[in-house]
Amino acid sequence: MTRVDEMDFPAGKVLCRKGESGGDFFVILDGQAEVETSAGKHMLGPGEFFGEIALLDNGPRSATVTAATPMHCLVLGHEQFRDVLHQKGDIALKVLRAVTHRLRETVGLPTG
């Protein structure tokens, strides 16, 4: 069984920093996060997630994510994230689509 933690973060809290080693996967339940990548800045809100790229390839974080407002999130560690991907194909597919979309935006590839 996969354990998921519910956590609260204050506005201004840096949840992951570009270039650092991966850590957790976050699903936003409430609040807004500011994402800063080499392609620019954008916001994420309830139902959206981040942290998957570094967990999928064991590489460094590709963005800095900061709580723009107080946030309430589901947080999964590396093992929990892998368990979810193995157990839930629909979630794995959603994560893969998000990674592909983010890659296209960052690299400037055509979108459909």
Image (cartoon, rainbow, N blue to C red):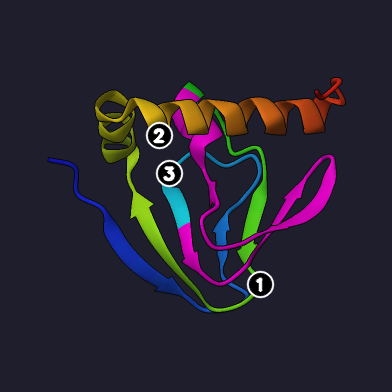
Query: N-terminal of the two: label 3 or label 2?
Result: 3
Residue bearing mark 1: 68
Q: Which mark is residue 95?
A: none
- Mark 3 and 2 residues: CB-CB less than 8 Å, in contact? no
Residue bearing mark 2: 91
Report x, y in % for residue 60.
57, 33
Residue bearing mark 3: 23
Task: From this view, report whether residue 31 is shown above or below residue 99.
Answer: below
Task: State the CA–CA distance, disc 2 to disc 1.
Answer: 26 Å
Kind of residue at badge 1 = Ala
Q: Report the residue at 37% width, 58% height from top.
A: 74
Q: Quadrant of the C terminus?
A: top right
Task: From this view, report whether residue 25 is shown above or below residue 104.
Answer: below
Query: N-terminal of the two: label 2 or label 1?
Result: 1
- Mark 2 and 1 residues: CB-CB less than 8 Å, in contact? no
Q: Can residue 67 be seen in this view?
A: yes
Q: Report the residue at 56% width, 72% height from top.
A: 31
1 or 3: mark nearer the eye: 1
Kind of residue at badge 3 = Gly
